[in-house]
Image (cartoon, rainbow, N blue to C red):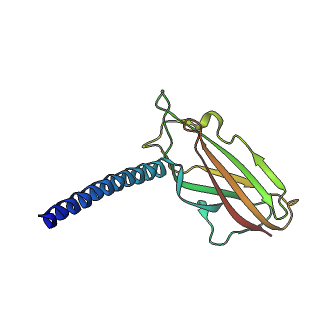
Amino acid sequence: MIKLLRFIIIILLVTAACSSNDSKSSEKITKNKDSLQNNVDELTAKKYYLALKDTRGVNKVKKKVFKRNDEIYFIFEDVGKFQNGSDSLSKIEMKMEVIDNVGIRVAHKPNLLGDKGIVKLNNGIAKKPFASFLTDLEDEVGKYVFKVTIYDKISGDSLIITEMFILE
């Protein structure tokens, strides 16, 4: 009888421990799902690249080497997910900076879009926003960083993307 009683007590303890672990596991899964959802809602860009304009339009460059007097385009594809305001419009802003190899900012445009950034987006995705930097003959030869910050003015989220290039 004592053995049977011990066996029942052990089973009850194991069952209680398992159900306690199950609730902790389910809590972890819920937290992980929440974290995953938060990551999905953050601003991302599917891809981005530097480009030059030629007779065929604006085209991606293979090498990130440019000549002085070139206009360098920094193009982003499928940026989002932007939130909509009460008017069902998204409010996007972009800031562009170019920094030389010693850390000096040689170009700065804080409000690239202005009112043009108040738009209706399909599924909260901006298809192909871009920034450009027109170099000139006075620019020093060397390495530069093209830095663009994209803002969702409704959610407060932002995305910073940088790309190094060489000016010769």
Q: How far across and down, in percent of the image, does residue 145 sit?
A: 74, 61
Q: How far across and down, in percent of the image, does residue 86 sit?
A: 48, 27
Q: Quadrant of residue 110?
A: top right
Front residue (pair 148, 66)? 148
Q: Is residue 89 left or right of residue 66?
A: left
Quadrant into which the N terminus falls: bottom left
For the point 86% across and 64% down, the residue is 140
- Furthest-right residue in view? 138
Q: Quadrant of residue 11?
A: bottom left
Front residue (pair 70, 75)? 75
- Furthest-front residue in view? 2
- Furthest-top residue in view? 87
Front residue (pair 63, 78)? 78
Q: How far across and down, in percent of the image, does residue 133 sit?
A: 73, 54
Q: How far across and down, in percent of the image, does residue 82 sit?
A: 51, 42
Above/below status of 77 relative to 109:
below
